[in-house]
Image (cartoon, rainbow, N blue to C red):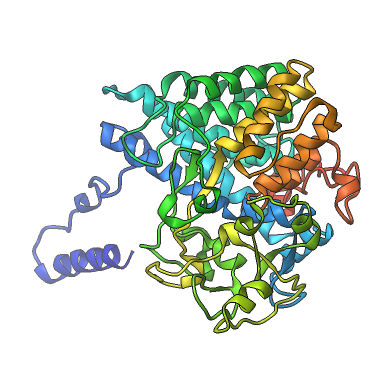
Amino acid sequence: MKIRNTFFRNTMFFCIMAMLPFSCSDDFVDVDSFDEDSESFFNSEEDYQSALIAAYDLLQSTYINVMLGEIASDNTLAGGESATDVPGIQEIDDMTHTPVNAQLRDIWSWMYAGVNRANYILEFKDKTDFPGKEEVLAQATFLRAYYYFELVKWFGDVPLAVDQRILFGDQDVIERTPKSEVYAQIETDLQFAAANLPYVQEETGRITKGAAQALLGKVYLYQDKFTEAATVLEDLINNGPYDLIEDYSTMFENDNENNIESVFEVQYTDIEGAGFGCLQCSEGNVAVGFNGIRNYSGPVFESGFSFNVPVQEVYDAFEDGDQRRDVAILDIEAWAAANPEVSYVEGYEHTGYYNRKYIARQGDLNTGDANLTNPNNYRAIRFADVLLMAAEAYNRGGINEAKAQEYLNRVRNRAGLPSITPSAGDLTTAIYNERRVELVGEGHRFFDLVRTGRAAQEIDGFTAGKHELFPIPSIEIELAGNRWEQNPGY
């Protein structure tokens, strides 16, 4: 803006100083814009790839979805410095959140930003042809599906836009779409993505056929479509390039990212930092800093803000001999006893435990605010999750109990635990328990409890008929002219 104003001032100054008998022409304002508009874009493969990278970028903002998916559940407490440290997070932990919760508005805004960026590509999908275009469009449709899946999980019925952006003014006419229709579009998008993507991409972090199949299986499972879920997940298990890594202790280390167990992984880096004024601007995993040990000094780990602290109950949920417990949850008192140089400060709601999967490790670049720019990738879908989803689909759908046990036991055996046998009791409960301990700290627990109808009995303060969904941010309802109904109970 400053350059443009200077240009106009200098132009007028020249006209005045010339003092010629000719009037100063206004032709100088009739020039092409230096900025490309949307209709002038998408003229090459490079344009599509640039827009696609921008659509990927909002995946990094899902750090808040992951962290709150744990805090809202019975796995962790909000923590932090005090009861007033980030009030929105404290409210979600206590089930007292309202439509003016700042973190819920972030989820809404950031996920819709992702939807809009994906739809920008798809709005102009027919403009320019180039080799490999279907694969670009398949990645865009996966991203749209991923962002919409997050939105429907959190908020239920949400405005649905397909192959067009939601622009200024649309808030006057757009309505909330029933979640069944949103799910139908998500399924269509993921089927297209799975049909047009390879299992292995040349560039690490790109979406694959396996990622699309796994997410499609999860979407089916969330709707109790057990036959459909079992079918797509079985195909992925049999034909995909994935397997469980042998040494679970290395799973979440920074030097073991994008391994054979990673079906879909959100990529983070410590090259570009950010600050509290724009958390979604960080290229690093912000949740890692939030989860970290308060004022920590010592080996292996770095300091953080002591949010999202695991409770004793989830620590005790691990069976004796389970090799995953100390990989997933850090017992800070035991760690300090084994390392006398360790010091730390107990935060609010201190339990003595930390989410070891996603706390900061030493050795990164510490770019910008070190607590906001951690390079730890988020393992959004792991092969262990795929096996447990398939086990659940086979079991709850009454399709194949033997398959359900086989896939459950693959996960258990990797953890050093004995196989579950038909005489061991309720297989469904065993699968639920296994999901909790295998995936603790990864953001799935709250939604697992809700979709299986167990949330009210497991989460303190949870009100059935209300807390299955979170409130639509009040500002969004106001911008829509107060035409939308709020979710029940809010």
Residue 76 sits in which quadrant?
A: bottom right
Instruction: Kindly identify the residue that appears in the image at 91 percent across and 49 percent down.
Output: 463
Residue 383 sits in which quadrant?
A: top right
Residue 177 sits in which quadrant?
A: top right
Can I make out residue 484 in this image? no
Left or right of 147? Residue 52 is: left
Instruction: Kindly identify the residue that appears in the image at 63 percent across and 56 percent down.
Output: 328
Left or right of 405? Residue 147 is: left
Left or right of 277? Residue 130 is: left
Instruction: Kindly identify the residue that appears in the image at 90 percent across and 41 percent down.
Output: 465
Left or right of 425? Residue 149 is: left
Task: Tell which of 321 and 311 is nearer to you.
Answer: 321
Task: Please say if 182 is above or below 231.
Answer: below
Q: Position of residue 452 (x, y in %)?
A: 81, 35
Q: Position of residue 140 (x, y in %)?
A: 45, 32
Task: Please say if 244 is above or below 33.
Answer: above
Q: Position of residue 441 (x, y in %)?
A: 65, 53
Instruction: Kindly identify the residue that appears in the image at 29 percent across and 66 percent down.
Output: 5
